[in-house]
Image (cartoon, grey):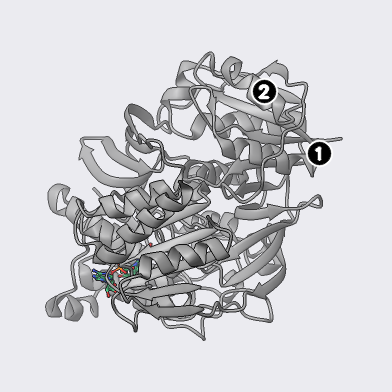
Amino acid sequence: MSEVLVLVDHVDGEVKKVTFELLTAARRLGEPAAVVVGAPGSAAKAKDALARHGAAAVYVAESDEAADLLVTPKVDVLAALVGSAAPAAVLVAATAEGKEVAGRLAVRVGSGVLADAVDLDGEGVATQSVFGGAYTVKARVTTGVPVISLRPGAVEAEESAGAAAEKTVEVPAVDPARAVRVTRREPVTGGDRPELAEASVVVSGGRGVGSADNFAIVEKLADVLGGAVGASRAAVDSGYYPHQFQVGQTGKTVAPQLYVALGISGAIQHRAGMQTSKTIVAVNKDPEAPIFEIADFGVVGDLFQVAPQLTEEIGKRKG
Amino acid sequence: MNIVVLVKQVPDTNSERRLTDSDHTLDRASADVVLDEINERAVEEALRLQEAHGGEVTVVTMGPDSATDALRKALSMGADKAVHLSDAALHGSDAVQTARALAKVIGTVEGVDLVLAGNEATDGRMGALPAMVAEVLGLPALTHARKVEIDGTTVRVERETDEGVAFVEASLPAVVSVGEKINEPRYPSFKGIMAAKKKPVATLGLADAGIDAAEVGLANATTTVLEVAPKPPRSGGQKIEDAGDGGVRIAEFLVAQKLI
Ligand SMILES: Cc1cc2nc3c(=O)[nH]c(=O)nc-3n(C[C@H](O)[C@H](O)[C@H](O)COP(=O)(O)OP(=O)(O)OC[C@H]3O[C@@H](n4cnc5c(N)ncnc54)[C@H](O)[C@@H]3O)c2cc1C
């Protein structure tokens, strides 16, 4: 069985959930081989988790440069492995960085690339959701080793024992003229809430929330539901909530079990990021707000009355 | 500082966007097309850098004849000249082919120090084209910038992604993609619009740009679409007026749906 290379998404060896989703999808195509590119010591930390999720092999590509240079070391290592291991496919997470790795790798090795797949079958056919979920597209790579990025949260991760046999690979030296050096990082501190893209409940606030302080109302409802907090672009532009929580066309795409929209009008660009949610609940004081066209349950009313009452009611029911 | 800005005409996100039944490519006839908003920000950033460092700003696009409108918009904002790669053979080109073709066009512009682009188009969401162009050109790719600074031959960028902010730097020439929060693009002035009409727009065919027809187009694409299915539009459900118990009513709905 051919190997399927999975680029491990990790921070200093702390493996992100999407990696397990990639390993699960990889098993449909062949034998998953995890590729850890990072600072020395990363793979040792990551190994157990990778073994639990079916990694037959772990390629260890570690160096200080691998951690300090942006994207390029990952492309270099994967390109070398595509040459030496002749994999059936390369899978990466469809994050900002992963999409870049995938695109550049395809250019480098002369392959085709499919971005942001929401599913992948055993024949290498990827499902994509385009124009904010208006279309479902099935596509495949026809040239070279398929390179595919998978949307976080789209495939359910399943445990499966793997040998996780370590193989050390070299991180090629990067030409200084092409290198992008990271001089400092300010990581996002997510707090206790689940990640927006992976949460099963998302509670979002819009311009109607009115201020950064008032976003506490949105957060309290999200917390009692165990959900993530999102925001419309208008709320972000008004400085109510940070940019990385923006949902929509130019923000995150979410598809939770439950999406609650508070004080959001439901502009087409906002809907593009949330309309494939399983159940949508909206609170808006304007009965004509377009969000009601797609809401399974809508309340025409003041969010400052309705949302705290809902938070309290859920709290009561939970006991 | 000579800057090339890559721009793209996309279907307006305010209109319904469709794929054609015949070959699953974008149905350009069905939607209003506009200069992608993120590209306006890339043009704006180029103009600000030009104000500080001098040089020329060239906008480059690949697309059908109508894409000239996107170029004119960029020129009316203040860019100096434009290059339009337009050839029927390009129809249906995929991301890898597009990156290679754009790299060739950038190669026709002399003395390029910086290539600027939007981080992600609203119609494709590949989110990687600028980096792919950099890969073809052998240049560093500094993507998702919320701030760009030029210091001699060094470019410094604050890169904002889900992971947080990374402060990154590289040597020029380089490719930089900008994010949504980088700036507010200026509106073209009346004077700018008039001046744009006289600015040079070079239209290149494949041969002019040195592109082999076998490298581009649907027939030579590296990926293929097997099937396209429109999702049925979502319809609204229950809508109630809040009579003082709106929160309780939602909780009851969530219980009925087994969501709590
Ligand atoms: C290229 C492009 C990309 C875009 N990308 C995105 C994107 O990614 N995400 C996004 O969200 N938008 C995006 N937009 C912007 C989008 O068009 C809308 O402007 C935006 O979604 C509006 O946000 P909003 O609903 O919070 O604000 P508004 O449209 O101003 O709506 C506020 C709503 O709050 C209601 N309200 C006010 N007070 C209360 C109250 N006390 N109780 C209850 N309801 C109240 C009002 O009735 C109103 O409906 C994009 C636009 C463009 C052109």
Q: Secondary structure under badge 1?
A: loop
Residue B67 is drawn in which quadrant? bottom left
- Percent position of residue A226, x then y: 46, 46
A64 relative to A169 in the view: left or right: left
Question: Can see residue B110?
Answer: no
Question: Can see residue A260?
Answer: yes
> Tag on residue A183?
none
Amino acid bearing label 2: Tyr
Quadrant in which the N terminus of chain A appears: top right
Say if mark 2 contacts mark 1, CB within 8 Å: no
Q: Which residue is mark 2?
A: A59
Residue pictured at 21% horizontal, 35% vertical: B152
Q: Dot 1: within a 10 Å radius of its alpha carbon, few (fewer than 14), some, or many (20 or more) residues?
A: some
Please say if B12 is above or below B8.
below
Q: Secondary structure under badge 2?
A: strand
* Distance between the alpha carbons at the discs numbered 2 and 1: 16 Å
Q: Chain of mark 1?
A: A
A152 relative to B110 in the view: left or right: right
